[in-house]
Image: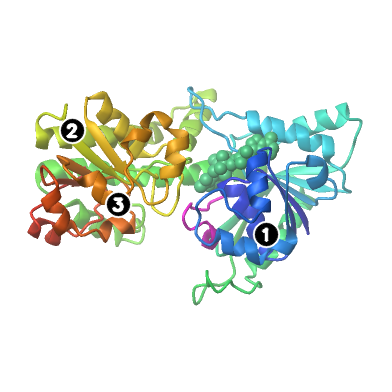
């Protein structure tokens, strides 16, 4: 099928590349000329494992452009995958969605097109996108038949390719049957798993047909928010229990295992520690609450999950104060900047929050990340001076080390040797990533969260 994807960020680029890989003709469109130039030259502007390899394998069916006139006419399916960042009141900023809808409305020209919201957008956005397209079609003196659908994205950065080629489910929502049929046809190779798996990202043995949830527009939109709010709540729940466990002398790791083995609960997303960050959970839980408010509803559980989560960042400062008593003027090292390993995404990364809180309290901070430092220099130039080229350099002469992102590189450090390079051997492993016995043997005072 002929497909256009508007927005070549983490979601749009992965979607475009995967759809090309399974056999579709894909135009990827972005307003960012630098990004498009890089993509045309075969360079990936983000860090995402296997994306470069898959893009190279699919290059004959992939095209990158900044031109709506080039990408949209003739497309049977147009995905909108632009950013929807949070505003101060929690509502997502829909200016990119508005602009993309208007531009695509001016260029639509096919017997029938499905316009698919892949961006995470508030309930009702599908109708709004439809209205915007109709308005701009009218203004441009064009008319072509289209329907709007929602196809929320569930990929996780760091495993985006596997999540897209081998998803646990695909959700499509529309109030138009023809749109749903076209989306079913588009996803058929993924649903049936009829494509040959790339050698670098193989299909797990026994992985079969993918579940398809086909629903109305509003339900599909709400599924995405409900999924993220649930996962965010699960993490905050274990952190809340962890706070109590710390007081009563119980072991949160054992508690998580003890409850997670109950299949009604499940053991994933039960990792106590620094909590969630990233571009989605914070933004989407805020948006869900803001939408509910419009309908006179409170989202008490979701609000509590947010409160517990953001409290964990201050908890890092508390743990350091408990240990060092005075942190003003001390040297503290933060290891890991990205909001999780295997991505360079720094949006709402807890590490950045922690670095700012520490500096506000007069701490001399050093920091390192194996992948995200270039992006950090661009997005946080005021903090660039904290960076060091190696983790060893960051740790030298430190009064405390805070492991904020559990990159495997940090597990593999020679912690025994590092112990003799610091001023004080305090190590706050906020992710429970390091081996406690060997660290203690090496003389580290190992601290954990909550
Ligand atoms: N990142 C994730 O893990 C993830 C997962 C699921 C859902 N989502 C949702 O997907 C959406 C996109 O997220 P992302 O992380 O890929 O964002 P991103 O910021 O990485 O990418 C958005 C891209 O859209 C481009 N863009 C903006 N306005 C445009 C326009 N008018 N025309 C063409 N291109 C335009 C930007 O230049 C940018 O390259 C968001 O709504 C997000 O909530 C993200």
**Helix, strand, or loop for circle 1?**
helix
The residue at which mark 2 appears reads as 318
Residue 373 seen:
yes
Give residue 19's mark.
1
* C-alpha distance separating marks 3 and 1: 33 Å
The residue at which mark 3 appears reads as 271
Mark 2 CB within 8 Å of ligand 1 = no
Q: Give ligand 1's quarter of the image.
A: top right
Residue visible at 59% across and 69% down in the picture = 209
Q: Say above or below: 238 vs 141.
A: below
Locate residue 223: give its quadrant. top right
Residue visible at 67% across and 46% down in the picture = 37
**Range of the magenta residues?**
151-164
Residue visible at 49% across and 37% down in the picture = 284
Give the mark nearer the N terminus: 3 vs 2.
3
Q: Report whether 110 appears left or right of 163.
A: right
């Amino acid at each position: 099928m002929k497909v256009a994807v508007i927005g070549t960020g983490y979601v749009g680029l992965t979607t475009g590349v995967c759809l090309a890989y399974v056999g579709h003709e894909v135009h990827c469109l972005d307003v960012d000329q630098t990004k498009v130039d890089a993509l045309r030259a075969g360079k990936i502007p983000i860090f995402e494992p296997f994306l470069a390899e898959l893009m190279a394998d699919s290059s004959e069916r992939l095209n990158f452009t900044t031109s709506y006139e080039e990408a949209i006419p003739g497309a049977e399916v147009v995905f909108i995958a632009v950013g929807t960042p949070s505003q101060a009141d929690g509502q997502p900023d829909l200016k990119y969605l508005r602009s993309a809808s208007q531009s695509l409305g001016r260029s639509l020209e096919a017997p029938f097109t499905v316009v698919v919201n892949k961006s995470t957008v508030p309930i009702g956005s599908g109708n709004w996108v439809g209205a915007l397209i109709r308005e701009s079609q009218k203004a441009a003196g064009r008319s072509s038949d289209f329907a709007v659908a929602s196809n929320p994205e569930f990929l996780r950065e760091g495993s985006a390719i596997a999540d897209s080629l081998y998803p646990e489910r695909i959700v499509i929502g529309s109030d138009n049957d023809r749109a749903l049929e076209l989306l079913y046809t588009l996803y058929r190779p993924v649903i049936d798993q009829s494509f040959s798996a790339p050698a670098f990202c193989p299909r797990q043995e026994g992985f079969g047909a993918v579940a398809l949830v086909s629903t109305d527009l509003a339900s599909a939109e709400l599924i995405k928010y409900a999924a993220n709010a649930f996962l965010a709540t699960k993490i905050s729940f274990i952190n809340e229990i962890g706070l109590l466990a710390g007081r009563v002398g119980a072991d949160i790791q054992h508690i998580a295992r003890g409850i997670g083995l109950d299949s009604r609960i499940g053991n994933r997303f039960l990792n106590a520690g620094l909590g969630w960050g990233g571009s989605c959970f914070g933004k989407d839980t805020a948006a869900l609450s803001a939408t509910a408010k419009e309908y006179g509803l409170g989202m008490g559980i979701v609000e509590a999950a947010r409160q517990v989560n953001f409290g964990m960042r201050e908890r890092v400062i508390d743990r350091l104060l408990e240990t060092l008593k005075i942190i003003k003027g001390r040297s503290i090292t933060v290891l890991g900047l990205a909001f999780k390993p295997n991505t360079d995404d720094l949006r709402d990364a807890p590490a950045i929050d922690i670095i700012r809180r520490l500096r506000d309290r007069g701490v001399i901070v050093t920091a390192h990340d194996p992948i995200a430092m270039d992006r950090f220099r661009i997005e946080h130039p005021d903090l660039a001076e904290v960076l060091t080229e190696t983790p060893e350099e960051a740790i030298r002469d430190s009064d405390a080390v805070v492991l904020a992102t559990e990159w495997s590189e940090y597990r593999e450090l020679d912690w025994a040797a590092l112990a003799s390079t610091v001023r004080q051997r305090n190590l706050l492993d906020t992710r429970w990533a390091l081996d406690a016995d060997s660290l203690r043997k090496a003389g580290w005072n190992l601290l954990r969260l909550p």
